[in-house]
Image (spheres, rainbow, N blue to C red):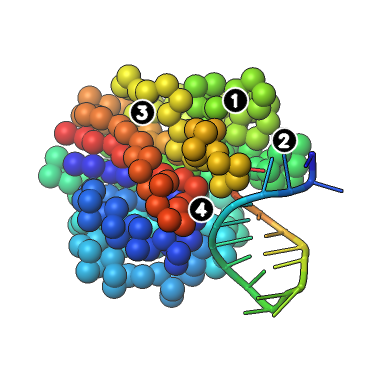
Amino acid sequence: MKIATWNINSLTVRLPQVLDWLAAHPVDVLCLQELKLSDDKFPMAALEAAGYHSAVFGQKTYNGVAILSRTPARNVVKNIVGFTDEQSRVIAATVDMPTGEIRVVNGYFVNGQSPGSEKFDYKMKWLESLRHWLRDELAQHPNLVLLGDFNITADDRDSFDPEGLRETIHHTSEERLHFQALVKLGLTDAFRMFDQPEKSYSWWDYREFAFRRNRGLRIDHILVSDPLKPLVRSCVIDKLPRKNERPSDHVPVVVELA
DNA sequence: ATGACGGTGTGGCACCGA
């Protein structure tokens, strides 16, 4: 079975690309971020026709997340429990698989703009709250996958210019400590369980031919809990959609579980 | 580099993203 994450930067614009991608990659679960639309604008029918149920936490203009699944998602939770947030950034749900149930936590992590800014403070508080809530979620749901747009490079391998961008946004020690703190809860970066091509990224700026020059970051991640770790068969980034016309600046990441 | 590119809103540009 396969679970994927994709920041699609407006589902209104990218719905045809999502449908094309699902037709070519019939994953069991697809987690989307940056829907940039309200719940009433969500294209439920088109996705149902493609064979997917949807759990949606939308927001107009900014943010918005959804879990698409072949079987209906259960026990849906929106945003971080215990953290009041105006922004729609997290949706969690239980999905039934042949091998058992999996708790899927889909996050559009805060960008943070720049260290020292108010938005960076919000990012730090958001990450701390996420960790505290996830500790409880893991206790209740041992088979858990945390995935989405983390807006954090886990280490220097995840950046096209780790020296030049040191301690800038997505590269700060504080952000990476938060990433490591999530790992310490008993989560593993599925991508790094395997040998991967050097300079593997999941996001490239629209400007300055960044994709063509492979000036990117790996900021979209899939973390699996300890009980799921022995089941992970592969984890890959699908760069191809970045070549589409009007592409998202992010591409899908896919994990395969036995 | 206060830049670039792209999405959204009720706009004639500003704001946000990463």
Give the residue at x 63% y 38%.
A124
Q: Earlier in the sequence, mark 1 or mark 3?
A: 1
Mark pair 4, 2: CA separation = 20 Å
Mark pair 1, 4: CA separation = 28 Å
Q: Nearer the viewer, mark 3 or mark 4?
A: 3
Where is mark 3, residue-wise?
Answer: A191
Q: Earlier in the sequence, mark 2 or mark 1?
A: 2
> Are the residues at dot 1 and dot 3 in contact (C-beta closer than 8 Å)?
no
Along the viewing direction, whichever of A77 and A52 lies nearer the viewer: A52
Give percent across and percent down for residue A150. 50, 39
Res. A144 image quadrant: top left
Disc 2 chain ID: A
Disc 4 chain ID: A
Q: Nearer the viewer, mark 1 or mark 4?
A: 1
Give percent across and percent down for residue A59. 52, 65
Along the viewing direction, whichever of A1 and A163 lies nearer the viewer: A163
Side of A188 relative to A128 (left or right): left
Q: Which mark is residue A247?
A: none
A168 shown above or below A63:
above
Q: Which mark is residue A115?
A: 2
Mark pair 2, 1: CA separation = 18 Å
Query: Mark 2 belongs to which amino acid?
Result: Pro
The N terminus of chain A sits in image quarter: top left
Mark pair 1, 3: CA separation = 20 Å
Query: Can marks 2 and 1 be said to lie on one chain?
Result: yes
Query: Mark 3 belongs to which amino acid?
Result: Phe
Disc 3 chain ID: A
Side of A179 relative to A244 (left or right): right
Query: Mark 1 belongs to which amino acid?
Result: Asp
Q: Residues within 10 Å of mark 2 (few under 14, many from 20)?
A: some
Q: Nearer the viewer, mark 4 or mark 2?
A: 2
